[in-house]
Image (cartoon, rainbow, N blue to C red):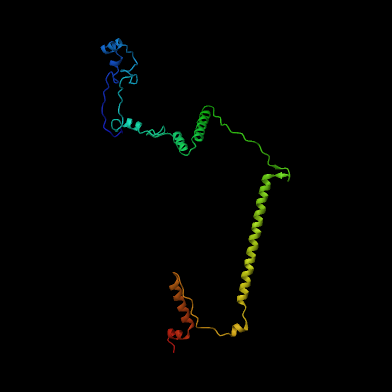
C-alpha cells in the first residue's frame, strides 16, 4: 500500500498464526490419532503426500486478487521468469542463454563475483601475466616499432610527392589551354561576327535578376536607347 492510502488499525491476537490448537498435545483429536498409530509430522490418509503442517496465515500487502501469486508460479516459464524485477546477474545469464553462450557468460559473471569478494576483503587486484616478446629486429639491428614508424613516414612522403606531381600537371594543362584561347590571329580578327546567335537563356532562381541586369547593360550600349533616356533627338 502507498503512503497516501488511509490508515487502518489492525489488531493481532495472542495467536496470530493459529498454531495453539495444533501444538496442544492434550486435545482429544491429537490423542485419538496417536491411538491409531499417527505420529506428529505425518500426513493424513493412505498416502504420505498430503501436507504435514497446518495452514499458515499470510498478511496481504498488495492490491492483487486472491490466488494471483499461485497463478504467477503456474505461468512461470523458466527459472529466470519470476515475475519480479530481477538482478543484473540473472539478466546477463538470460541473454547468454538466448545467444547460445550460457556457459561463457556464467563463467564471466562468477569470475566478476569472485573478484568483488577478493577486492572487498583484501583490496587485491590480480593481473593476468602474458608472454614477453622481444621487439628487437636482429636482421636490421633496430626496434620493430621504429621500423613501422619509418615505413609510415615513407608512405606519407610518397603520397605527398604523387599529389604534388598531379597538381603541377593540372596547372600546366590549364595554362596551355589559356594560352591557346588567348592567341588571336589575323583571320580571327577579320572574320565577321555572327550576330544572329541568341544569348543563352538564364536558368535557376537568379534568372529574373540576371535578365534585368542584361537589359540594363543593353540599354547603356544601344545609342537609340540612350537618346530616349536623355530625351535627345
Image height check: is 194 above or below 102? below
**What is the count of numbered marks?**
0
Front residue (pair 67, 208): 67
Q: Quadrant of residue 44?
A: top left
Name the residue: 46% across, 36% down: 97
**Is residue 33 left or right of 130 when viewed as pictured?**
left
Residue 213: percent from left, percent from top: 46, 76
Front residue (pair 14, 6): 14
Residue 174: percent from left, percent from top: 61, 70
Name the residue: 67% across, 50% down: 151
Q: Quadrant of residue 15?
A: top left
Q: Quadrant of residue 45?
A: top left
Residue 96: percent from left, percent from top: 47, 37
Name the residue: 63% across, 60% down: 163
Front residue (pair 193, 42): 42
Front residue (pair 33, 211): 33
Residue at far front of view: 46
Quadrant into which the C terminus falls: bottom left
Quadrant into which the N terminus falls: top left
Amino acid at each position: 500500500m502507498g503512503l497516501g492510502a488511509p490508515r487502518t488499525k489492525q489488531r493481532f491476537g495472542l495467536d496470530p498464526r493459529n498454531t495453539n490448537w495444533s501444538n496442544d498435545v492434550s486435545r482429544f483429536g491429537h490423542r485419538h490419532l496417536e491411538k491409531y498409530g499417527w505420529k506428529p509430522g505425518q500426513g493424513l490418509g493412505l498416502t504420505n503426500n498430503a501436507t504435514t503442517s497446518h495452514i499458515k496465515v499470510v498478511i496481504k500487502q498488495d492490491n492483487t486478487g486472491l490466488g494471483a501469486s499461485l497463478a504467477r508460479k503456474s505461468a512461470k516459464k523458466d527459472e529466470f521468469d519470476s515475475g519480479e524485477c530481477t538482478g543484473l546477474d540473472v539478466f546477463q545469464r538470460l541473454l547468454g542463454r538466448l545467444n547460445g553462450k550460457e556457459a561463457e557468460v556464467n563463467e564471466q559473471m562468477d569470475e566478476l563475483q569472485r573478484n568483488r569478494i577478493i577486492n572487498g576483503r583484501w583490496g587485491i587486484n590480480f593481473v593476468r601475466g602474458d608472454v614477453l616478446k622481444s621487439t628487437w629486429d636482429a636482421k636490421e639491428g633496430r626496434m620493430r616499432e621504429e621500423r613501422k614508424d619509418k615505413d609510415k613516414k615513407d608512405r606519407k612522403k610518397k603520397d605527398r610527392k604523387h599529389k604534388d606531381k598531379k597538381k603541377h600537371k593540372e596547372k600546366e594543362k590549364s595554362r596551355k589551354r589559356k594560352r591557346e584561347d588567348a592567341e588571336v590571329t589575323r583571320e580571327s580578327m577579320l572574320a565577321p561576327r555572327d550576330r544572329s546567335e541568341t544569348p543563352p537563356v538564364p536558368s535557376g532562381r537568379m534568372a529574373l535578376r540576371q535578365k534585368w541586369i542584361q537589359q540594363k547593360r543593353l540599354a547603356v550600349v544601344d545609342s537609340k536607347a540612350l537618346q530616349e533616356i536623355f530625351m535627345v533627338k
